[in-house]
Amino acid sequence: MMLSKKTKYGLKALTYLASVDGKEPVQIAEIAKHENISQKFLESILLTLRRNGFLGSKKGKGGGYYLIKQPEDIKMTSVMRVLEGPIAMVPCVSLNFYEKCDDCPDENKCSVHKLMLQVRDSALNVYRNNTLADLIS
Amino acid sequence: MMLSKKTKYGLKALTYLASVDGKEPVQIAEIAKHENISQKFLESILLTLRRNGFLGSKKGKGGGYYLIKQPEDIKMTSVMRVLEGPIAMVPCVSLNFYEKCDDCPDENKCSVHKLMLQVRDSALNVYRNNTLADLIS
DNA sequence: TTAAAATCCATTAAAACTATAGGATAAAAG
DNA sequence: CTTTTATCCTATAGTTTTAATGGATTTTAA
């Protein structure tokens, strides 16, 4: 149930990029230093963020990463799904990654299902109500 | 962010014990079979549930496990904390297991902190509003 | 005293997560 | 065109967590 460091670092990097604003590319090294993150690890995280449409990049001198969208338009639901995976804690209550449990003959009678549905909805509610912009102010 | 099988199986076992009711001990083998759980794995789970005051046990022939409290009095907050650990997804927002982050100079300015506080509160709200009895009906 | 059942202890197997290494590619500056 | 700078990419090592297993011990009922 712990948040992975990948997600934690990814969120911090996004926040930093949003805070410096401007379309000026920011170098990995600068982000890593400012947020106390291993540069090499951060590198791979930024790569997945770019591949998933959150960041743009520029190579060579003066290069680096920058936000593609406005912070107000970056929803936590999508960030979490890309970095952390499904928001649901069990596949049988997942909206985007549904899977039936091997055990469990009847979902509707399953206590775990019943509880985790509520947990998913409450988490979803939080992520839907937060954009990157909300985490800065 | 996935629910561990330990927690899943533990919840199912508790639910089953609550459903058979009566103070008759139920054998591990019976629970395991009914819920499609590896008996050996379930064994260790029931043991921790007993050590944490949820279950009583009786040894020898005719022995087994049984609920110590009424299902209405078993809160999901305490079950989750024992089986899954802290409800918070980062230690810096945990009520019962608080720890400062090594990185992160100022919690109050941390975006991850800000988001995870909300997630914790929403999850807590769900767990506080559910007892074992609620999961059966 | 025998059989059934929980308990205890130690170990392994498998999976996920974290981090690093090393080179390939591309862009910019001079 | 060469050097520098920085991203891009793949692989893998190390660590931790999760899941499962095996076997010896103790308790209880009949």
Image (cartoon, coloured by chain):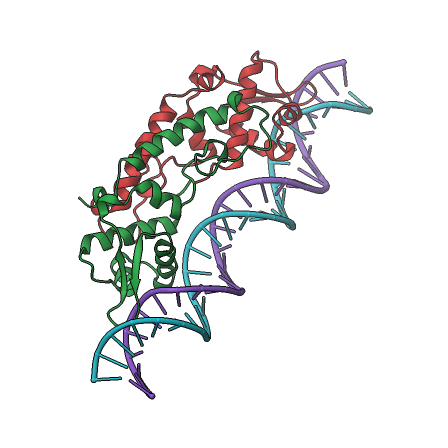
Chain colours: A green, B red, C cyan, D purple
- Whether residue B95 is visible to the viewer of this picture, yes or no, is no
Residue at the image point whose x is 37% and y is 63% from the top: A40
Please determine whether, in this image, residue B28 is positioned above or below residue A46: above
Residue at 61 percent across and 31 percent down: it is B37
Q: Quadrant of residue B126?
A: top left
Position in image of residue A56 (x %, y %): 30, 58
**What percent of the width, then of the height, locates residue C16?**
49, 47
**Is residue D8 found left or right of A126 in the rendered image?**
right
Q: Which residue is at 35% across, 59% downward?
A: A42
In-image side of A22 versus B117 (left or right): left
Give the total number of marks visible in the rendering: 0
In which quadrant will I find the N terminus of chain A?
A: top left
Give the quarter of the image for residue D23: top right
Residue B91 lies, in percent from the top left, at 34, 42
Q: Looking at the image, which residue is at 24% across and 62% down?
A: A26
Give the residue furthest to the top. B22
Q: Nearer the viewer, residue B26 or A77?
A: A77
Image height check: is C10 above or below D2?
A: above
The quarter of the image holding the C terminus of chain A is top left
Where, by quadrant of the figure, is residue D29 drawn? top right
Q: Viewer-proximal residue, D18 or B137? A: B137
Confirm whether residue A121 shows in the render.
Answer: yes
Residue A100 in the image, given as x and y percentages of width and height: 55, 32
> Is A122 left, or right, of C6 in this rendering?
left
